[in-house]
Amino acid sequence: MGGMLPTDHQVVLGKSGENYACWELERLGYEILERRYRTRVGEIDIVARDRGTLVFIEVKARRSGRFGPPAEAVSAQKRLKLMQMASSYIFAKRLSNDRCRFDVVSVTFGAGERLPKIEVFKAAFDANG
């Protein structure tokens, strides 16, 4: 969003997207540990465990797929920020020995669709870029 404040519509879309993401992740066996975890750098959408791995999850929600999959909206700058936030979380929770990864959950609300299309991209990127 480049420093701009989100509109009420974007906030509602984002929270709704996170709710759907959590339901899907739990269905897949993830254990949700945190939602909207605040750090000095920003907010991690979801922190979860998946079979012993600590997972930092970025949720991308959109009204349509017109601009490409939501997961593609995770820029290099955003990935770097996510890694900084993950480091902050790991330090605060004393979890430095845990394996971790970064997933992206794409939630696309199609026009006239009752339920959104939800895609989970496991290990969407790693700390090495």
Image (cartoon, rainbow, N blue to C red):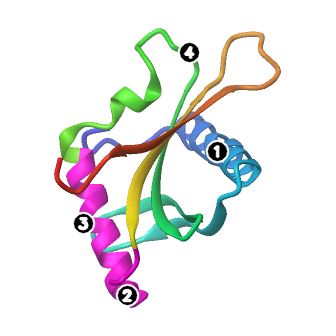
Q: Which of marks 4 and 2 is nearer the N terminus?
A: 4
Residue 62: x and y in percent read 54, 26
3 and 4 marks in contact (CB < 8 Å):
no
As drawn, 68 above or below 21: above
Say if the magenta span includes residue 68. no
Q: Name the residue under label 1.
A: 21
| Callout 4 crowding tier (Cα within 10 Å): few <14, some 14–19, many ≥20 | some
Kindly identify the amino acid type of the residue bearing the numbered disc 3: Gln
In the current view of this chain or complex, which residue is farthest to the bottom?
94
* Quarter of the figure with residue 61: top right
2 and 1 marks in contact (CB < 8 Å):
no
Q: Earlier in the sequence, mark 3 or mark 4?
A: 4
Kindly identify the amino acid type of the residue bearing the numbered disc 4: Ser
**Mark 3 → mark 4, Cα distance in angstroms:** 30 Å
**Mark 4 → mark 2, Cα distance in angstroms:** 37 Å
Residue 37: x and y in percent read 48, 69
